[in-house]
Amino acid sequence: MNKGQSILTKREKEIFDLLVHNLTTREIADQLSISEKTVRNHISNVILKLNVKGRSQAIVELLRLGVITL
């Protein structure tokens, strides 16, 4: 496992794997059987971990690190 993969929890990675495929917060919540607020909390945590300004920048950084793929 590379350094990038170790920065995300399993759930955070699941959420960003779905986000990168253009699913909405609601669709991700439904698919993972969690609340939209929980999805948003995970996204916020990743944004903080990566020190980026938003979910789009987080996706770009995770792609660059090889944590998620298109």
Image (cartoon, helix red, strand yellow):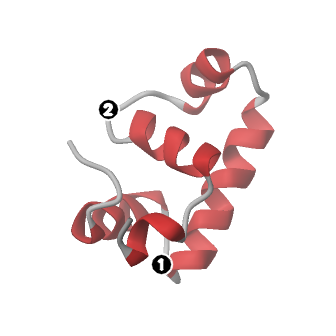
Q: Nearer the viewer, residue 14 or 57?
A: 14
Residue 7 quadrant? bottom right
**Above or below for 56 versus 32:** below
Report whether 39 appears left or right of 25: right
Q: Residue at x 54, y 40 (%)?
A: 15
* Numbered label attached to residue 39: none
Image location of residue 60, percent across then percent down: 29, 64
Q: Residues within 10 Å of mark 1 (few under 14, many from 20)?
A: some
Residue furthest toward the front? Answer: 1
Residue 11 quadrant? top right
Image location of residue 14, percent across then percent down: 52, 39
- Spatial distance from mark 1 to mark 2, Cα to Cα? 20 Å
Q: Which residue is mark 1?
A: 52
| Quadrant that contains the C terminus | top left
**Above or below for 6 versus 41:** below
Which of the marked residues, 1 or 2, is nearer the chain's N terminus?
2
Residue 26 quadrant? top right
Q: Which residue is mark 2?
A: 21
Q: Residue at x 51, y 48 (%)?
A: 13
Q: Residues within 10 Å of mark 2 (few under 14, many from 20)?
A: few
Image location of residue 46, percent across then percent down: 58, 65
Report whether 58 appears left or right of 68: right
| Quadrant that contains the N terminus | bottom left
Q: Residue at x 46, y 46 (%)?
A: 16
Image location of residue 32, percent across then percent down: 65, 23
What amino acid type is highlighted by mark number 1?
Val
